[in-house]
Each structure stands twice: as C-alpha cells, then as structure tokens.
C-alpha cells in the first residue's frame, strides 16, 4: 500500500463524508491540532514516565484518535467512552495532586525532560482546544472535544509538576 495519494497536492483534503475541503478548513485545523497533541504525548511517553502515567497517556492518545476521527467526519468511528467521560482524567489529576505541594504561584515550564515535554503538550492542547472552539462546529461532538481538551490541559500541567516532583526537580516560580 502506498502512503501517498497525491489527492492533497492542490491544498484540499477529504473529510470522512467524502466532501473535499481546503486544508485550512476549521475541521481539518481541529483534528490536525489533536494529531499534534497526540504526537507530543508520544514524546512524553518515550522519556520513560512511570507506569501509571504511561497507562493514562496511552488512554489519552486513544481518546484523541477517536475525537479526531469524529471531527474529521468519519462514519466508521464513534466517540470513545474515554473521550466522552472526563471523570477518569479528573481522578488522575486528583491522585497526582495528592502527592504535590500546594501551588500558590505561577511556575515556569521546565524541569526534567519528560516534564518539559508535558508542558509543551499542555500548551499544544490549549491551542487544540482553541481551534475546536474557533471552528464554530457547535455540535455535541465539538462540546465533548472542548471539555476533554480542557481537562487534558489541566492533567498535563499536573503531570509535569508530578514528574518533576518524582524526579526531584525544583519548580521555578514566576516573578514579575
């Protein structure tokens, strides 16, 4: 099977419905942003995060694929339960937060390599969230995607702090 089709060479792509749209279409922007988040999460996992975090990150990656497929208009894909129910993300955030010192200031992104990448993934997640909102899709799926991405951004912030804490890396407080 060839990976290239040449059908996108003129700046258009097909949605799951078969409709041809410009690659700048809001749907294409939205699922493209999800793909970038997914790629950054793969990079975080490649740095050897603890097993619990790795399990959750894989679960997030699978949910992102599900969301992306639905945003692309795929008829073959339904929205996964993990993407629809953000409760598991909230429970993960709470478990990690229990180990962390209270945060009273903004912190600068950084620390150990995996935490630094988690901060990048968090920032890209927030951009993906804005892309879905800006797309004006207004569908239930878009609302689910926004809720999922909002919670994921929170989870990645806490994950970065948790990874730094586990690695003994200090958080650098932001001062004006």
Image (spheres, grey):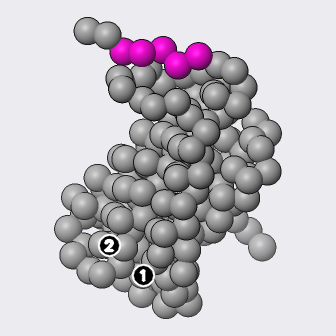
Which image quarter: residue 76? bottom right
Q: Which mark is residue 142?
A: 2
Q: Is residue 126 above or below residue 3?
A: above
Q: Is residue 164 magenta?
A: no
Distance between the alpha carbons at the discs numbered 2 and 1: 12 Å
Q: Magenta residues?
A: 170-174
- Is residue 23 visible in the rendered image? The answer is no
On the rendered structure, is 81 left or right of 124? right
**Residue 93 at x, y percent in the picture:** 52, 52
Which residue in the rendered view is the most extreme toward the bottom?
75
User: Which numbered marker is on residue 73?
Assistant: 1
* 1 over 34 or under it: above or below: below
The picture places residue 64, in percent across and down from the top left corner, at 54, 65
Q: Nearer the viewer, mark 2 or mark 1?
A: 2
Residue at x-position 37% and y-position 47%:
126
Q: Quadrant of the C terminus?
A: top left
How many numbered discs sit on the rendered protein?
A: 2
Mark 1 residue crowding within 10 angstroms, few (<14) / some (14–19) / many (20+):
some
Q: Secondary structure at mark 1?
A: loop
Q: Is residue 111 left or right of residue 149?
A: right
Q: Main secondary structure of the magenta part?
A: loop
Helix, strand or loop status at disc 2: helix
């Amino acid at each position: 099977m060839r990976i290239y089709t040449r059908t996108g060479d003129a700046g258009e792509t097909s949605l799951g419905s078969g409709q041809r749209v410009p690659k700048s279409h809001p749907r294409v922007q939205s699922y493209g942003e999800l793909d970038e988040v997914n790629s950054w999460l793969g990079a975080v996992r490649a740095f050897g995060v603890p097993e619990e975090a790795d399990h959750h990150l894989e679960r997030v990656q699978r949910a992102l694929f599900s969301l992306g497929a639905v945003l692309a208009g795929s008829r073959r894909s339904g929205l996964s339960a993990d993407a629809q129910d953000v409760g598991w993300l909230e429970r993960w955030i709470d478990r990690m937060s229990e180990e962390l010192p209270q945060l009273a200031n903004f912190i600068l992104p950084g620390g150990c390599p995996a935490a630094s990448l988690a901060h990048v993934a968090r920032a890209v997640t927030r951009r993906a969230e804005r892309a879905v909102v800006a797309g004006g899709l207004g569908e239930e799926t878009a609302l689910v995607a926004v809720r999922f991405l909002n919670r994921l951004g929170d989870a990645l912030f806490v994950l970065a702090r948790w990874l730094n804490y586990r690695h003994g890396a200090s958080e650098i407080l932001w001062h004006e």
